[in-house]
Amino acid sequence: MAFARSRQALAIAGVLGLALGVTACGTGNDKKSSKASSPECAAYEKYQGHDGKKVTIYSSIRDIEADRLDQSWKQFEDCTGIDIDHEGSGEFEAQIGVRVDGGNAPDLAFIPQPGLLKRFVDSGKIKEVGADTKALAEQNFSPDWLKYSTVNGKLYGVPLGSNVKSYVWYSPKTFKEKGWSVPTTWDELIALSDKIAASGTKPWCAGIESGDATGWPATDWIEDVLLRTQGVEVYDQWTTHGIPFNDPKVADAVNKAGTILKNEKYVNGGFGGVKSIATTSFQEAGTPITTGKCAMHRQASFYANQWPEGTKVAEDGDVFAFYFPAVDPAKGKPVLGAGEFVSAFADRPEVQAVQTYLASGEYVNSRAKIGDWLSANKKLDINNVPNPVDKLSVQILQDPKTEFRFDGSDLMPAAVGAGTFWKGMVDWINGKDTTTVLNGIEGSWK
Amino acid sequence: MEFDFAAEQPKFLMLMYGLIAFVAVVGGLLLLLDVVPAWFDRRREERLIAAVASGAPLPRRRKPREGLFALFFLLPTLLLIAVGLVVPAIRTTLLSFMDKDSSDWVGLANYSWLFSEDSIVRVLINSLIWVLLVPLVATAFGLIYAVLVDKARFESVAKSLIFLPMAISFVGAAIIWKFVYAYRGDGDQIGLLNQIVVSLGGEPKQWLLESPLNTFLLIVIMIWIQAGFAMVVLSAAIKAIPADIVEAARLDGVSPWQMFWQITMPSIRPAVIVVVVTLSIATLKVFDIVRTATNGNYDTSVIANEMYNQAFRYGEPGQGSALAVVLFVLVIPIVIYQIRNLRQQREG
């Protein structure tokens, strides 16, 4: 070898020393300092005093929506000096458990399933919300909403964003051309479907494929129909296992949903027969409305983001949504929806400050202005909600006649709500009969 | 979208940390490997010189300290295996006897659940089908291909074509094949398989929905990936057969059929076993393909997929652990067979 051994060693040692030196330089101090005294920070005065502290948040929110989140609390960060570090994950439901059990819990998490929230409360991981937060939450949210994050009389989370699921998307343009009118009762809905089917168009589009969450859109159908056929009391008994999952009342609702979803004459515009619902992704499912291959698609408010670019979402535009009609409108206006809850795994003062801020009217309005977002927070000013479907949703949520109920599969234990219920719906669409499917789900609820 | 270097600064910083850590660790190890033996050598040289100078008898060459040195490198590995493998294995086994909160002992409840629940029995059967079919078909395919292209023209091109899928991740492969199996009710089919069916005058089918056909279609994906591996190993083994044996057989006038069964197969038997064993273990662990293609729906789930669902998504760590233990128990006989086989070869 041409190289002397000692020199070679020297060279390696040199590289090593250089590397260590650079590492030392790299760890710069990037703590934020507040601009607390400036006038635009007056609103944040009560959250101040935690300069340079860091709060970590873990959620399922990613990409553009995550950027909007960061934007929404920018001023709060600037004024209080609290650094909010948000991390979104596509595997949130599975990973949050791993992180919490592994002793690596985030300070705050946005939990979209009350069932999951309760599991962490039962194992003593989630901290009860502080007194300030509780007072503000009670002021800004209806008792209905707080119920979902209350366990044994104590509040363990604050509602954040919301969505309304009881919508049927349609094309106002096509409806006008063909002379169809928006139905206001279940019977009108079926009559309209028959009329559309007779005209040669498939009235409904549906799709329940959603990666590892395949099946959830069908659970929404069942929940929405059960709310309409049996009312909120039976619905509450069902989600809390007060009545068995395979109760005849539930079976009746499933069969009623089946009169649409399992009707070859009604589905599935542009995709094939009934079975194609199982393999059509929920994102794609509604798009044939824009090409006239189907007329209606039952899906939540957030479906507004799924339309092809250039589609005008408005009451007089290419697509819009109407309220999924009640069977008997005289019996009230049930609304199915969902949302996420801000829960804390740490009770440091700066964590509580962030939790309180997220429950405030200032926060929801600042987030809503950025777009495509809404909350059940009563302080939300409808003028700050730009999107027409979101506006409609806020109206529904703030309407005192509305009987709001949370997505049932999110309330159930995960093994049922995100397990056998989803799987059972896939089998149901795929041809299994209602009784077998419901018995199977009931058997898994322990 | 514009790429803003300044905005990506944290990521670049992380990347730099990673590089630096890599250089530090690898550099440190190299330094150690270089400096320490050199130091021992120098010591020995000095002693020799001193002995020669003083006229004393030359010191006997000490046993090299390789044992000590090996231990030094073995220790971190043993430690990492203990932390990353042994401890979790023991913990998983314990968890499989506990309830969903991992707080109370429930005995064999999780195991009886495993064998009584219809959907889980289906999962076990599916895993069995996988582990029977994939190693056999992939090895057979690889073997036939290796024999056929051996010494053929464009051999390297033909081999690399089969080997290419190895370079694709399981998730990527599953997505590719999902397009192959894709279904559109009316209008243009976007799936290759359905397009072929339609152009032959058939009706398009929803391939991934029909059990048990769908399990076999998923197995095709795994075979597509692994046949290349089998082919490469077996081809190397075929090329390693001593030329004089082949020549002797030729002079004796064997037919190609006899050549394959009397000469080639016995000579490459060890390689075939290695390939089958490796593929069996890889197949038992299969997760990505099923999760990406169907997520275990339509009766296609396998043990690893169900284990993940139970333990992490449904909050049933007891049941998930029981599935993990079953998987572990299933792998053990294969590993034992492999070890015994290696030992026999060494003796023979």
Image (cartoon, rainbow, N blue to C red):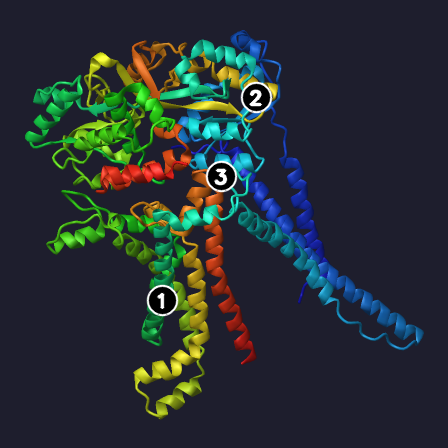
Q: Give the distance between the C-alpha atoms of the residues marked 3 and 2, in whole angstroms.
A: 30 Å
Seen in the image, is B172 located left or right of residue B330?
left
Label 1: how many Cα within 10 Å (few below 14, some 14–19, many 20+): some
The chain to which mark 1 is attached is B
The one of A363 and A433 positioned closer to us in this rendering: A433
Residue A316 on image: x %, y % = 19, 17
**Circle on res. B100:** 3
Q: Position of residue B237 (x, y in %)?
A: 44, 74
Q: Which residue appears at 52% of the width and 15% of the height?
A: A356
What is the chain identity of the residue bearing mark 3? Answer: B
Q: Residue B118 in the image: x percent, y percent? A: 34, 48
Q: Position of residue A374 (x, y in %)?
A: 37, 18
Q: Secondary structure at mark 3?
A: loop
Please report the residue visible at 77 percent of the width from the left and 66 percent of the height from the top: B41
Residue A244, image quadrant: top left
Between residue A101 and residue B53, name the one nearer to us: A101
| Residue at which label 2 appears | A351
Q: Are marks 3 and 1 in contact (CB under 8 Å)?
A: no
Q: Which residue is mark 1?
A: B136
